[in-house]
Amino acid sequence: MKDHYAGIRLRAALLAPLLFSACAGSASYLISPALQAVPDGRIALLPFENYSNDVSAPGLMRGEISKRFMLRGYSPLDTAETDEKLRAMGITDGGQLPSVKPEEIGGALGVSLLCYGSLEDFTFQNLGFVVRKSVGLRIRIVSAATGETLFDAVGKGRNIKVFLNRDEATAAFVVYSVQKLAENMLKHPLWAESGKAMDQAFARLPRR
């Protein structure tokens, strides 16, 4: 019995940093009055920079973020068309974008607004005793004409489950493994957490 409670205390101590990190941090925004002064609501969603370990997630998130812009009254360009024009400029990856002036990109795409995005985190960690799901993203709207950042926001969606009982942890490992497989098959990985992150990032974006 003594060993049992010692094990629980040890697991709780190991989990504390994870729980603290899940609660820490808050949303931050930058909103320029010049954003609403732009007459043309068309916006190009540029390829995302990817700081996560999931190579497919940036493309999936980019598609969902395009829908969020439409809900706010913007008119996103077709991402396939955007990528084709960027390839003609020698740009195939979001990491290459900082080396090209916004004015040049906007001229090639024919828009006044550019959306730069980065996927900061995209994690589904299933350890049995701990299941951690986390999505973090950043979006910036930049004026193609001036290079000024008109909107800058971060969004985070997190969910952590802790199981101190061994039987519960074993069952949770199986359940969440199946959930991860199903979400990947449906091409909706971390669907709830992604939604929370996007909700947070778009919460203060002015409507057109």
Image (cartoon, grey):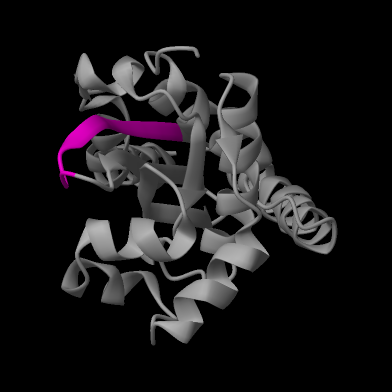
Toward the viewer: 197 or 118? 118
Assess whether residue 154 is covered by the magenta stretch.
Answer: yes
User: In the image, residue 56 lies at what x, y percent?
Assistant: 59, 69
Quarter of the image with the N terminus in it = top left
Q: Is residue 96 visible?
A: yes
Q: What segment carries the magenta color?
A: 146-157
Assess whether residue 54 is covered by the magenta stretch.
Answer: no
Toward the viewer: 138 or 151? 151
Q: Residue at x 45, y 34 (%)?
A: 158
User: In the image, residue 60 lies at what x, y percent?
Assistant: 63, 56
Q: Residue at x 59, y 20 (%)?
A: 73
Main secondary structure found in the magenta portion = strand
Q: Is residue 37 above or below residue 162?
A: above
Q: Residue at x 44, y 81 (%)?
A: 92
Q: Is residue 119 above or below residue 191?
A: below
Question: How many labels sit on residues?
Answer: 0
Q: Is residue 133 visible?
A: no
User: In the image, residue 146 lies at what x, y percent?
Assistant: 16, 44
Toward the viewer: 134 or 168? 134
Left/right of residue 145 with respect to residue 109 in the rendered view: left
Left/right of residue 151 with respect to residue 208 in the rendered view: left
Q: Residue at x 38, y 36 (%)?
A: 5
User: In the image, residue 20 lies at what x, y percent?
Assistant: 24, 31
Left/right of residue 193 with respect to residue 36 in the rendered view: right
Toward the viewer: 19 or 68? 68
